[in-house]
Amino acid sequence: MARYIFVTGGVVSSLGKGLSSASLAYLLQSRGYKVRIRKLDPYLNVDPGTMSPFQHGEVFVTDDGAETDLDLGHYERFSGISAKQSDNITTGQIYSDVLKKERKGKYLGKTVQVIPHITDRIKQFIKSDIKNEDFVICEIGGTVGDIESLPFVEAIRQFSNDVGKKNTLFIHLTLVPFMKASDEIKTKPTQHSVKELRSIGVQPDIIICRCEKNIPLDQKKKISLFCNVDIKNVIQTIDVKTIYEAPISFNKENLDKQVLSYFKIKSKKNVNLNPWKKITKIVLSTKKNVNIAVIGKYVNLKDAYKSLDEALVHGGIHNNLKVNLVRVESDNLKPSEIKNKLKGVSGILIPGGFGKRGTEGKIEAIKYARKKKIPFLGICFGMQMAIIEFARNVLKIKKASSSELNSKCVPVVGLIHEWKKDGKTIKGTNKELGGTMRLGSYPAELLNNTLIRDIYRSKIITERHRHRYEVNMNYKDQFEKKGLLFSGNSPDKSLPEIIELKNHPWFIGVQFHPEFKSRPLAPHPLFSSFIKAAKNHKK
Ligand code: GLN
């Protein structure tokens, strides 16, 4: 039977619950166990797909097409396990399921209540789709004490009773602040947070204390005493210089050892921390660097392009280089400013995006990359913008655009049904917008003798998608005659997946999001190659 580890957070948000869970997953895996990680989010949106990056950071997409919380990205990057739709649920989804059931009369006239109906649905989620996993790590979003997270904490309390205490472990992550003025470490916020957790029936078994400095033994003893936790299970986590140090640091503090000891099981293998040590060393010591411009709408928002930022770092690790991100805000980016803003960059990247705002600036930047032969990577919206730029400036189709941006344009990018039927351009209606999003993994077939084939070294690849519009296949011949090749396409050849320029050292657009599959221990070949091209770019 699987053992369940529940991770809650206290005092403040952003303490690194996701990273702690992901690091623990790596350590347990490395010790020979099969692990699954899931996230329970307390907000009312049914999924984060509709949430603005301003509110919630990036939307992470799984192979099976779920739009999920960005923490699932951390989990994948650290554990190497591909997340699934069944690994993320929100309060909105839970209520929506319960209400649907209620409307169908499935509760047989009973009064539908938070306890037991909502909590039952949460427990059902925790147990669902588990096969031969040894450990299921469930991170509870939010902070203990929030109204929203109450039903989740209640559900995990019940769950522990249902499957037995010996099969469940509660980890609580809290803040142990250091007060500069008095030169002291304070345990009170942790005591209060644990008190809060205990008042709703959950006694933590392990407390992870996030702090700036080493916690002296006396303070650890205090936490142990007041929070009713074995001193060995008071585990400190000091701010690390790079996130890749986290698994090393948790192992040093015996987190994995204490988890196994709690469940009274032995390690099957020795933990292998060498890969993390190796990349930590590269990240911290490498002196050589390369400047990459990322041009987008939310570039100044920390988590809006989380997976992308990570994938670029991974590409740097592969090339033994530090990647400096030059974030360029696409809004109000004037053509006259491009040269100045992109001075000194060796690579230009346009990430995914939605809507008209900032597009003209992106198109100008692509023109600059094309003409100056600067390595360019266009991801999803970035590829669509590259198509528009080429259509306007090389094919001289002045009104070329995407029907997402202008309904009266020449749609070199449009909804599938705008152009798919009999090769004729057919206009869609707004009504058809919904349900046309292409989500999750799709295959692409790569042409021989192309840059992309050289990069992937494989004929068929699969990558994750999240978009509604497609490059219009009807213009393929016109583009190709002028040197823009559709070098990767859907196996039925109806959808362009990858474009590249013939007379350019490195210019690639992809309709999918390769960043979701890049991992620090396995950098994505597209990012490794892009960074290599940037390294070789002569300014
Ligand atoms: N807005 C574009 C579309 O829907 C691109 C989406 C994206 O970049 N993820 O097709």
Image (cartoon, helix red, strand yellow):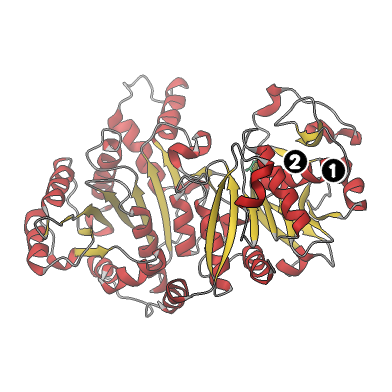
Quarter of the image with the N terminus is: bottom left
Q: Which mark is residue 470?
A: 2
Categorize mark 1 by other alpha carbons within 10 Å: few (<14), some (14-19), many (20+): many
Residue at point 41% right, 73% down? 30
Element assignment for label 2: strand
Whether residue 117 is situated above or below residue 199 in the rendered picture: above
Q: Quadrant of residue 529?
A: bottom right
> For this rendering, which residue is in front, 118 or 426?
426
> For this rendering, which residue is in front, 239 or 265?
239
Whether residue 431 is situated above or below residue 313 in the rendered picture: above
Pointer 1 with pointer 2, Cβ within 8 A: yes
Label 1, label 2: how far apart the Cα atoms are: 9 Å
Residue at point 59% right, 44% down? 296
Q: Which mark is residue 473?
A: 1
Instruction: Tell me which amino acid carries mark 1.
Output: Met
Instruction: Tell me which amino acid carries mark 2.
Output: Glu
Q: Is mark 2 within 8 Å of ligand 1?
A: yes
Q: Could you tell me if residue 148 is visible in this image? A: yes
Q: Quadrant of residue 78?
A: bottom left
> For this rendering, which residue is in front, 380 or 101?
380
Element assignment for label 1: helix
In this image, 302 relative to 410: left or right?
left
In this image, 410 relative to 460: left or right?
right
Please provide percent x and percent y for residue 60. Answer: 52, 48
